[in-house]
């Protein structure tokens, strides 16, 4: 039962972080220059919830491309899947 609740909280956290990321991206008035700040902000939010999240790993074009596609197309499901893949409990 505890594992089910833990998995549900993990999925809900991933979804909420993706929604917040999408909203921040929408609210930012400039197309360029906000990605690093957004990724750092989401990393800090995840850390506050007891998770490690690195949306900017070196030499991983796939993660960057999915992040860009998700933010440009406002695809919360893609962002949530990406975050869920990278989120680690600490």
Image (spheres, helix red, strand yellow):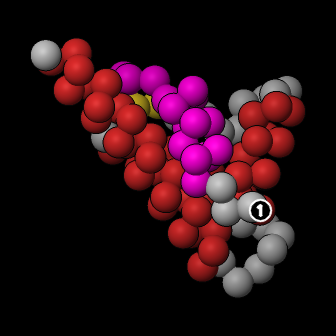
Counting from the top left corner in percent of width and height, residue 32 is at 83, 70
Residue 38 in sight in this render = yes
Counting from the top left corner in percent of width and height, residue 34 is at 71, 66
- Which residue is found at the position 72% from the left and 31% from the top? 57
Residue 31 sits above or below residue 38 on the image: below
- Which residue is found at the position 71% from the left and 52% from the top? 70
Residue 46 sits above or below residue 36 on the image: above
Region rendered in magenta: 76-90
Residue 23 sits above or below residue 38 on the image: below
- Which residue is found at the position 37% from the left and 42% from the top? 13
Q: Main secondary structure of the magenta part?
A: helix
Q: Quadrant of residue 82?
A: top right
Q: Quadrant of residue 85?
A: top right
The answer to which of 23 and 90 lies nearer the viewer is: 23
Counting from the top left corner in percent of width and height, residue 22 is at 58, 62
Q: Secondary structure at mark 1?
A: helix
Which residue, as the protein is rendered here, is positioned at the far left? 1
How many marks the image carries: the answer is 1
Q: Quadrant of residue 6?
A: top left
Residue 9 inside the magenta-drawn segment: no
Residue 47 in sight in this render = no
Instruction: Categorize mark 1 by other alpha carbons within 10 Å: few (<14), some (14-19), many (20+).
Output: few
Left or right: where 65 falls relative to 16 = right
Residue pointed to by mark 1:
72
Residue 81 inside the magenta-drawn segment: yes
Left or right: where 6 falls relative to 31 = left
Quadrant of the frame with the N terminus: top left
- Which residue is found at the position 75% from the left and 61% from the top? 73
Residue 47 sits above or below residue 74 on the image: above
The answer to which of 67 and 56 lies nearer the viewer is: 67
Counting from the top left corner in percent of width and height, residue 40 is at 58, 51
């Amino acid at each position: 039962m505890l594992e089910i609740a833990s998995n549900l909280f993990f999925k809900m956290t991933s979804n909420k972080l993706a929604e917040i990321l999408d909203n921040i991206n929408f609210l930012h008035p400039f197309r360029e220059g906000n990605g690093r700040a957004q990724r750092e902000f989401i990393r800090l939010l995840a850390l506050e919830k007891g998770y490690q999240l690195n949306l900017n790993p070196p030499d991983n074009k796939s993660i960057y491309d999915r992040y860009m596609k998700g933010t440009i197309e406002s695809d919360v499901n893609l962002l949530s899947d990406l975050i869920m893949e990278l989120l680690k409990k600490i």
